[in-house]
Image: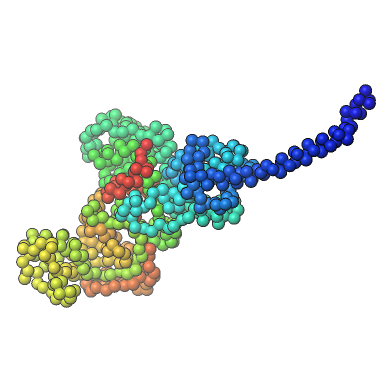
């Protein structure tokens, strides 16, 4: 036994030679096989060289992926033979929560990423790598510049969008911390964007809870109106509680239109740009009956518009929202002055653009634009021969190219026989209480000829929908804006401004510091107090965006 055992444990010389050959062959075979990372790189190179990248049932375009890799020796950004790295895990988490920005996780192939997440084969890892690169390219562009180009979605949007190259941005990343910083820089950091994201989350929670009820058709009810049916009051209470306008539970008769309910209706009306009279009429009922899914889509479209905007507005700027008929002066993230405005008519809408407020005109002349002179003022003069005279509008011959040098008395011309094509005159309105620009005009050079100005038609500010101008922006509180703009110019307080206005002498002041002005079109926003506002699409500029962000 011992001899046998010893023989079995101690190989002969022939056995030793065989074992050595076997070990040598095994080591040679190991050396002949590529290392795990090399196998991944080869699978990645082969995928990128193919006309179409095929991963399971999905297809990727290698032309969009090629800028992220060296053609001959592509190095993975996200995975190794050990599996997904820290950057991959961060990107995956962000894609899962893309809905917080109003985006769809499915757009970034999150299901394909999940399906390949644990695949450790070189081919599977290569597919995961390319899925992640494709997702990063699309997600980073969507957050940085918008899912859809602004000029494609809204031809009246003229704010420039900064260029962004996802491949160059990723190539500049040195470590995982750099990548996290890159991700943080993609979405707008403006407080308005963050408040919209919070509102979106709240309205999605309302949708998940079942939304809100719709009011059935019926007559107006509220203060000064006939009592409403009990079921209408009950529905109204439920509807206002769902969105937070009516909080808690009031005591007393819940079928009565009591003071807390009236206050809630007024709050709702104010948030929707309606006359806050507490009466549930046709327009208020229509706004109440907009489904929560439509409001969610509206918030998502506004988030998209914010992604088109500059990332830095500055600490001090003026924001005009033509969809909301409002102007806000913002300093250090807070609104320090707000007012109602009048914007362009639908046929002559106010565009969206950025400019710089530089000068203020006191008692301005109105050099009437040629189109307005021909199409708007000529018909009024034809109906009333004293129209120009009573409004201080002077007429100048434009046929000789001398500008405003050769004046003609309006009574000397045969206005009736003129038409827009034969009208060859310049019009200028003198300073005064009837001047269409009012007493103060704010100049912000831009290619659209839009400026901010006072107006003698103060009653129009009481209208809910204020589209009455020829694309310029009329101010409810021009004096307040003038005081703000001149606050660092010694001696120009309200008293002096009013004294200068009373002289009716025209003068122009250069502001001590230009103020950036952003004229935007936003049908939803959240104010400094957290109230969510919605407005109608008065210029019909949301139609294309609605195809990308529909109500579901």
Of 168 and 141, nearer the camera is 168
Say how many tags the image has: 0
Q: Position of residue 63 (x, y in %)?
A: 47, 49
Q: Residue at x 33, y 37 (%)?
A: 291
Residue at screen point 61% across, 44% down: 40
The quarter of the rendered structure image containing the N terminus is top right
* Residue furthest out toward the front: 14
Vertical position of residue 203 compared to residue 426: above or below:
above
Residue that appears at 75% across and 41% down: 27
Based on the displayed image, in which of its 4 quarters is residue 336 positioned? bottom left
440 on left or right of 54: left
Quadrant in the picture for residue 231: top left
Give above or below for 355 relative to 129: below
Q: Is residue 333 visible?
A: yes
How does the figure colour the protein chain or chains? rainbow
Where is residue 504 shown, x and y percent of the image?
Answer: 22, 72
């Amino acid at each position: 036994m011992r001899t046998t055992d010893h023989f079995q444990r101690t190989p002969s010389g022939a056995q030793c030679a065989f074992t050595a050959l076997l070990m040598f062959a095994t080591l040679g075979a190991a050396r002949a096989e590529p290392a795990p990372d090399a196998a991944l790189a080869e699978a990645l190179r082969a995928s990128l060289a193919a006309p179409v990248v095929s991963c399971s049932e999905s297809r990727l375009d290698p032309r969009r992926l090629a800028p992220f890799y060296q053609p001959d020796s592509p190095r993975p950004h996200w995975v190794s033979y050990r599996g997904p790295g820290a950057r991959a895990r961060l990107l995956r988490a962000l894609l899962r929560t893309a809905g917080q920005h109003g985006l769809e996780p499915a757009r970034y192939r999150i299901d394909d990423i999940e399906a390949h997440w644990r695949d450790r084969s070189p081919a599977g890892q290569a597919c995961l790598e390319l899925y992640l690169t494709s997702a990063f390219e699309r997600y980073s562009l969507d957050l940085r510049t918008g899912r859809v180009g602004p000029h494609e979605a809204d031809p009246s949007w003229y704010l420039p969008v900064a260029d962004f190259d996802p491949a160059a941005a990723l190539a500049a990343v040195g470590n995982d911390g750099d990548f996290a910083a890159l991700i943080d820089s993609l979405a707008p950091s403006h407080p308005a964007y963050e408040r919209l994201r919070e509102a979106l989350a709240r309205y999605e929670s309302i949708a998940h809870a079942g939304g809100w009820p719709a009011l059935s058709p019926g007559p107006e009810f509220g203060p000064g109106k006939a009592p409403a049916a009990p079921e209408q009051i009950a529905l109204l209470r439920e509807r206002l509680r769902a969105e937070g306008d009516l909080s808690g539970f009031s005591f007393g008769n819940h079928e009565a239109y009591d003071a807390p309910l009236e206050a809630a209706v007024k709050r709702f009306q104010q948030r929707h740009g309606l006359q806050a009279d507490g009466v549930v009429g046709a327009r208020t009922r229509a706004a109440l009956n907009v489904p929560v899914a439509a409001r969610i889509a509206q918030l998502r479209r506004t988030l998209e518009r914010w992604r088109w905007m500059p990332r830095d507005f500055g600490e001090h700027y003026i924001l005009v929202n033509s969809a909301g008929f409002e102007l806000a002066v913002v300093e250090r993230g807070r609104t320090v002055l707000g007012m109602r405005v009048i914007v362009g008519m639908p046929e002559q809408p106010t565009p969206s653009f950025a400019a710089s407020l530089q000068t203020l005109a006191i008692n301005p002349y109105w050099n009437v634009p040629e189109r307005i002179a021909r199409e708007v003022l000529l018909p009024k003069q034809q109906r009333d021969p004293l129209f120009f005279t009573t409004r201080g509008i002077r007429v100048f011959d434009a046929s000789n190219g001398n500008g405003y040098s050769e004046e003609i008395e309006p009574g000397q011309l045969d206005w009736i026989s003129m038409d827009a094509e034969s009208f060859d005159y310049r019009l200028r309105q003198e300073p005064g209480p009837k001047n269409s620009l009012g007493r103060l005009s704010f100049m912000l050079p831009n290619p659209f000829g839009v400026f901010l100005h006072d107006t003698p038609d103060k009653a129009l500010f009481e209208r809910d929908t204020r589209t009455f101008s020829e694309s310029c922006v009329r101010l409810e509180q021009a004096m307040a804006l003038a005081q703000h703009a001149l606050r660092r110019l010694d001696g120009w307080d309200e008293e002096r401004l009013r004294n200068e206005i009373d002289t009716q002498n025209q003068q122009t002041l250069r502001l001590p510091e230009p103020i950036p002005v952003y004229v935007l079109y936003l049908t939803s926003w959240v104010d400094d107090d957290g109230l969510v506002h919605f407005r109608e699409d008065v210029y019909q500029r949301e139609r294309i965006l609605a195809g990308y962000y529909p109500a579901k």
